[in-house]
């Protein structure tokens, strides 16, 4: 009984079959991950970004990297600002509740006028007016920081600037909504 001879690894048909199998497998993997690869390619900004990533270690030119880092700093500060806004909201809510529960020595005459109400609230909660003023100033500073970031006509930087600006506006509107019962205008906050 004869033994089968193993096929030589160097035979042309085996090399062709192996190359075809590798090509088919690679194509399948690329097609399966095409969305991820496309988004990654766009994120690193095409061939130039890929070459810059390999050569310099960063896919962004230096001027765009600086703009992106500036926006990241602003975004971090906005996260802290959101936390501060929550603290202010607690103080405002507490001031409202204390003003409703307030002193029982008031007469049953007409309700206290608006100026007396504001005065009473801020006498009872002096830190509220201070925090509102500081927070409002902080939001203005963040808005100025966003405006100072150079976009260099880059779409990603423009998109992030717009997103950050919209977030600042939302925070400002939320603060205004919270303090509207106290009828404070921007001059009175500081």
Image (cartoon, rainbow, N blue to C red):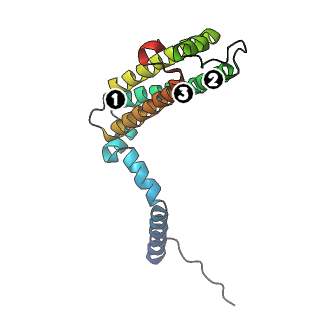
Which of 107 and 30 lies nearest the eye of the viewer? Answer: 107
Helix, strand or loop under label 2: helix
Mark 3 or mark 1: which comes first in sequence? Answer: 1
The answer to whether residue 58 shows anywhere in this view is no
Tag 2 and tag 1, C-beta contact below 8 Å: no
Q: Which residue is mark 2?
A: 96
- Image coordinates of residue 41 in percent, x first then y, are 39, 50
Tag 3 and tag 1, C-beta contact below 8 Å: no
The residue under the point 53% across, 24% down is 179
- Image coordinates of residue 102 in percent, x first then y, are 69, 17
**Which residue is situated farthest in the left direction here?**
153
- Image coordinates of residue 63 in percent, x first then y, are 32, 28
Query: Quick check: 23 left or right of 4?
Result: left
Q: Which residue is mark 3?
A: 178
Q: How many marks?
A: 3
Q: Which residue is mark 1?
A: 62
């Amino acid at each position: 009984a004869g033994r089968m001879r193993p096929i030589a690894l160097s035979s042309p048909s085996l090399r062709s079959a192996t190359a075809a199998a590798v090509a088919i497998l690679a194509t399948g993997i690329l097609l399966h991950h095409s969305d991820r690869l496309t988004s990654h390619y766009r994120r690193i900004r095409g061939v130039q970004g890929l070459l810059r990533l390999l050569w310099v270690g960063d896919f962004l030119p230096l001027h765009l990297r600086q703009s992106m880092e500036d926006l990241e700093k602003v975004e971090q500060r906005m996260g802290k600002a959101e936390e501060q806004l929550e603290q202010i909201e607690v103080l405002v809510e507490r001031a409202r509740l204390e003003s409703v529960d307030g002193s029982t020595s008031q007469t049953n005459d007409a309700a206290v006028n608006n100026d007396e109400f504001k005065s009473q609230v801020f006498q009872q909660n002096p830190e509220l007016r201070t925090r509102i003023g500081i927070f409002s100033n902080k939001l203005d500073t963040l808005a100025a920081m966003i405006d100072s970031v150079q976009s260099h006509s880059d779409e990603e930087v423009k998109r992030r600037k717009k997103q950050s600006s919209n977030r600042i506006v939302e925070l400002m509107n939320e603060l205004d909504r919270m303090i509207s019962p106290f009828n404070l205008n921007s001059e009175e906050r500081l």
